[in-house]
Amino acid sequence: MAVRERLSGNEAVAYAIKQVNPDVMPAFPITPSTEIPQYVANYIANGEIDTEFIHVESEHSAMSATIGASAAGARAITATSSCGMALMWEELYVAASNRLPIVLALVNRALSGPININADHSDSMGARDSGWIQIYAESNQEVYDNFIQAFPIAEDKRVHLPVMVCQDGFITSHGVENILLVEDDKVKRFVGAYEPEHYLLNETERMALGPYAVSNYYMETKRAQREAMINAREVILETASRFEEMTGRKYGFFEEYQMEDAEYAVVIIGSAAGTCKAAIEEIRATTGKKVGLIKIRVFRPFPEEEIAKALSKVKAVAILDRSEMFAATSGPLGAEVRAAMYQAHSTAEVVNYFYGLGGRDITVSDFKSVYDNLETIARTHVVTGMYEYIGLRSTQSEEV
Amino acid sequence: MRDTVEIRWHGRGGQGAKTAALLLADVAFKTGKYVQGFPEYGPERMGAPITAYNRISGNPITVHSNIYEPDYVVVVDESLLDSIDVTKGLNPKGAVIINSTRSKEEIEEHLHGYQGAVYTVDAKAISMKALGKNYPNSPMLAATVAVSKIMEREEFLAEMKASFQHKFAKKPEVIDGNMMALELAFEAAV
């Protein structure tokens, strides 16, 4: 029997860490990090787990120590958020290129400046090219489930890549919701004992990790990382299917909500998808309009063909981005979904929105306006620009 | 949607409005409900206005926005009435519950013409009497349950007693005082 609980997203991830009982967790546990390292430190202090917690002097050191531990052959994790991850930047690439199956609990928050630590995807979207698998969550339940699934994905011999398990800052991380927890023994069986294939403390196999690679070797290394990312696709689905057998909860690259007959679709990542679902229920119940949602769970690797297929029958699509990339055109999700649709010769109209930057709220009625706009665009075939904003105050606005 | 009760809490950093919202989520969860309890963070400092929210429902809740049209508003610090329109968007069939020594009539002048029910609870006096200290959040929690009728009085008190027994396992002498604060506030708000 699953355990019915109510937990914040931070508590849910810390609980999953307790159930997995990893070997090593280096972390820098003050703002902008979250309560996750603090809760784990409590579990360790209370003797509930025997993870070695390493107090480091910065996030750069946190990721460096996690890399060292993982390279030595330990199951190593860390947790951070916002500018904390920005300080890990060069080490993120080192973790991925050395093919270390690290799991990172990331609470998505804005990057400075102006100084802001509210929900925003700038931190992980900025790291989208670092070679990490990225998995996002709508709810506390999903981030818990994703965290457990991250280990078998990262450690699979076909993959050997680090995984970033993301959730929206404050909205799920500090918000308490109902959650179903999996029993400890089932989680342990699901994740399994970690048996590294190649590791530095193996005295029977001499190896070097992270050496200088001249131009004769660098490109092949990148090609190998790409192959691993391609392999991750099937491993992510296999792991999801095993998780469904255990819990009944179904996961894939993305969730399709009311898409069977949808004419107008929103594509989005994270907690706002739940708000969009409430708008969809209301619109369908009151007007009968065929509106639907695609909620991206896996952004790296990007499920290009599958998304294009899921959008193949709609008349108009709104892609919502919670981070800027200052291309002065699309946001990161907008650009990739557009590319996927182009590749599939889609004729649907597309509009890209920026929303929720730095924690700006998005409501059910905002989503209703988005669907109204999609209907107009589908009818007139006029899209005014590459992107629009939701909830942006005008410069003359009196309300703060 | 409408089987969901939505509550907005106004307080100042350090007064326990966020804790009260999380406690309400806790106690509603224990009676079998689907719950959300979440704060809206501004600058993190003592005394700054803070807002916290609850959604309580018989069905799973997917909405992740703040609450703009609450059924109930709870004001833990009445000095906020001068700077914040606390009844903004408040359902006229709902109620506002304010921690104050003043009468309902005096308070109503500060409520921007809100037409719904107004309750005042002297949470400080209740807390001083029951605990000898000013902890306004527990009395305000009890008053909120009494006014919103989210659950029955006995059910609420039994669940709270169980969580106090857990929380204060090492100082059981404060349990009776906390229970008294809840009971007094429950009476004061009905």
Image (cartoon, coloured by chain):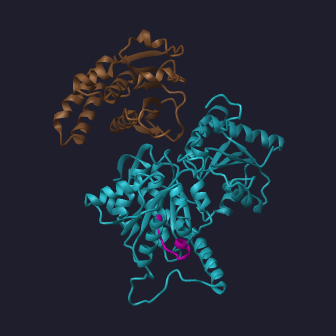
Q: Residue at x 27, y 60 (%)?
A: A48
Which of the 4 image quarters holds residue A310? bottom right
Image coordinates of residue A35 in percent, x first then y, are 40, 51
Q: Residue at x 57, y 56 (%)?
A: A123
Tell me, yes or no, if residue A128 can be seen here: yes
Tell me, yes or no, if residue A244 can be seen here: no
**Which of A131 and A184 lies nearest the eye of the viewer?**
A131
Image coordinates of residue B52 in percent, x first then y, are 45, 34
Residue B9 covered by magenta stretch: no
| Identity of the residue furthest to the left in this view | B173
- Vertical relation: B75 (above or below) A279: above
Quadrant including the C terminus of chain A? top right
Q: Residue at x 51, y 18 (%)?
A: B92
| Identity of the residue furthest to the top in this view | B105
Q: Which residues are magenta?
A: A94-103
Q: Is residue A366 left or right of residue B175?
A: right
- Vertical relation: B177 (above or below) B122: below
- Vertical relation: B87 (above or below) A224: above
Q: Is residue A281 left or right of residue B176?
A: right
**Chain letter for the part of the structure drawn in cyan:** A
Which of the 4 image quarters holds residue B46? top left
Image coordinates of residue A216 in percent, x first then y, are 66, 87
Image coordinates of residue B13 in percent, x first then y, are 41, 35
**Which of A60 and A68 lies nearest the eye of the viewer?**
A60
Total labels: the figure holds 0
Q: Residue at x 76, y 63 (%)?
A: A343
Q: Is residue A380 left or right of residue A165?
A: right
Q: Colour of chain B?
A: brown
- Vertical relation: B181 (above or below) A254: above
